[in-house]
Image (cartoon, helix red, strand yellow):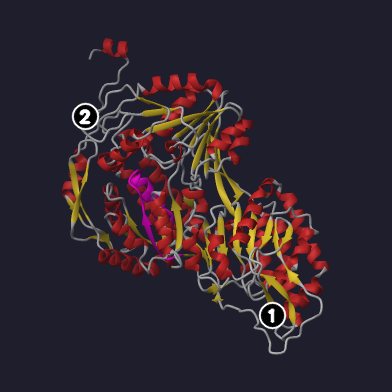
Amino acid sequence: MTTREIFETMDYGPAPESSAEALAWIAAKGPAFGAFIDGAFAKPGETFATRNPATGAELARITQSSAEQVDKAVTAARRAFPGWSKLSGHQRARHLYALARLLQKHARLFAVLESLDNGKPIREARDIDVPLAQRHFYYHAGLAQLLDDEMPGHAPLGVCGQVIPWNFPLLMLSWKIAPALAAGNTVVLKPAEYTSLTALLFADICREAGLPKGVVNIVTGDGRTGEALTTHPDVNKVAFTGSTEVGRRIRQATAGSGKSLTLELGGKSPYIVFDDADIDSAIEGLVDAIWFNQGQVCCAGSRLLVQEGIAADFHARLKARMDKLRLGDPLDKSIDVGAVVDPVQHATITRLVDRNTEGETYRAATPVPEQGCFYPPTLITGLSPAAPLMQEEIFGPVLVSTTFRTPSEAVEIANNTRYGLAATVWTENLNLALDVAPKLAAGVVWVNATNLFDAAAPFGGVRESGFGREGGWEGLLAYLEPALKTKPLKPADPVPAPDRPDAPGLDRTAKMYVGGKQARPDGGYSQPVWSAKGRLLGHMGLGNRKDIRNAVEAARGAAAWARTTGHLRAQILYYIGENLSARSAEFAARIRDLTGVNAKTAEAEVDVAIDRLFTYAAWADKFDGTAKSVPIRGIALAMTEPVGVIGALAPDDAPLLGALSVIAPAIAMGNRIVLVPSYAAPLAATDLYQVLDTSDLPGGVVNIVTGDPADLAEPLASHMDVDAIWAFTPHVSAEAVERASASNLKRSWVHDGHGIDWMGKSGEGRRFLQAATEIKTIWVPYGE
């Protein structure tokens, strides 16, 4: 092609990247690879092929790691943990810095190997994945350096089992390994079976960096290897990125094991375009949102919502832009869309699109290579919000679209999904953007941009997109635990009926507290509550599944509480404390009767309860978000938001203080709560009804259902409209609660057989506030 012809057509010529160095590395180190355990590569065992999805050619043979090999890797990590965790933050920072430098020195090798193994365009691997992986190790070297001063009183968890997906093999590795090592943990990581090569190259540079043996271990294989790792009894922390279905199974499998768990799962992210948006800029952003990495991105903007007035023009311009996208050899630097990772995934995309019968399907008029796993950029318009393709994750280069008329309708359609990972808003009206962003059920929102990531900015989802954050101090916290002294948790059963009861003449029956009103138990059953001396103190209603349902419905109806100011919530908490103080003698007497403690102990519990209410009143308008220092001309705001509806099973010890220590942080942060009080001493909580009624607390913000926690835990933990479950009662196993919570993958905080010292400082503070909030990261670029 002559220069004249180039200027006349403006076509891109080929710009191939050589694969020689990457293939030479495979040949030298393989071509069959064993697991990396205790600082050395094991001999390959049973292997399977990893292939170039663009050609189908075999690249290498990867070991299918057995349960025995996983056990060896975990044992090596356990053996390395004491030495690694005892290093100073500075010493760990030096190792992380060395890894970051080696990622830079081998940047081209990593980029080419990633493109060969995954099928993504070399431009994306070279310009996005590898630099971001380097950034994570540099950033977490800094966190390691500062950890001892900035987060005192925290300790590493131990051995971390990490499972990553095939869409961003190296980047996901860095998101997992960097914070784990910075916090002082050791790691066993399983890469995806389709894309293990860059993880094995990383293992190789761990040796170059002088990382101590056993600190990082890589086991390869399919889901069987992942299952052996996530369920291993000596793994303290599981971090998983992948599909929602597998994440649910991991939640169920790890229930009651005491393992810390973070899940970054699927998404169906809305891409909202308002009628005042710069249409051409929004279309370029959309290209990055859905056709970046062939649409194989958990946070891909795969649901296009366009305001009705510009929809026809927008779709027409979008189709013209789609026709100019170039598919082909991922190692060609002029290519826009590479190959889908594997024939299995290609078949899944094809099946989902072909069975759709709604709307209009448009495939880009661009040549599609005959060889390899290539799928054309596809747009499906005219879908209803409930259409299967608007609800289910396709995980391919397929964009689905519908329209909206008003901002409120846009928010309603955007939130009409079980997912909540990310969202994009395009508008020239910044006031509109910042009004809509907090209303979207998503862990990340991009304004007039898309797919912005950085090690300093927390990333993660809500709803069935998982829980936990990666990046920033928030992500590091997921690999730490408070260094607290705990005591074994012992259940306190209700006092049995005495042989000679002392029953007063006037009946006192405590009802449920639902929606700001007292309600009789649905089942019509109640149970006497006796003092230690055999005196009848009253009756408590025995709640059932329907009472839980009614309480959750009332909590959902009080959603306006989340939109109140921190100042208003603080005033009400102060008022509750004031009203409790006016009746302190009455509550102290009640505690004395219920538990048999002496007057001084009972009075101390009431005093601490009042103090705790004041503490969370003080925090209500001070537990702030942060502005993150990200390397763009713009800002990333990590904002705290309420979790939503929290179901809580209160502790037996300190029946008044325990209940208020759970209620206060929840409502201070804008949540609503459904509380099951102490089974042994429920009347300490039911006596709060009048205190709450006279403290201007809106109905439905606090709901109390009495009864046996063993009967109420499952319906509360499995309820699809409960967003988090806290279980501090010894009457219910952690396993039962966490297994039930998998219904909608709600966040859980459960006892591990040890109790909290509710009278001490460990019974309050940031740990409770963090459990009561989600982090939403809002990216706002500057300039035109």
User: Quarter holding the C terminus?
Assistant: top right
Range shown magenta: 157-179
Q: Is residue 315 left or right of residue 377?
A: right
Residue identifier under label 1: 595
Tell me residue 514's x, y (percent). Answer: 69, 58
Q: Residues within 10 Å of mark 2 (few under 14, many from 20)?
A: few
Q: Residue at x 33, y 66 (%)?
A: 74
Callout 2: SS: loop
Q: Is residue 120 left or right of residue 662?
A: left
Tell me residue 416's x, y (percent). Answer: 53, 40
User: Quarter holding the N terminus?
Assistant: top left
Task: Give 124 or 98, whichever is nearer the viewer.
Answer: 124
Tell me residue 703's x, y (percent). Answer: 67, 59
Callout 1: SS: helix
Task: Give 193 or 720, whichever is nearer the viewer.
Answer: 720
Q: Residue at x 30, y 18 (%)?
A: 11
Tell me residue 584's x, y (percent). Answer: 80, 71
Which of the two discs, 1 and 2, labels the residue nearer the N terminus?
2
Task: Give 635 or 552, whichever is nearer the viewer.
Answer: 552
Instruction: Establish if 403 lies above or below 584.
Output: above
> Does residue 159 show up magenta in the picture?
yes
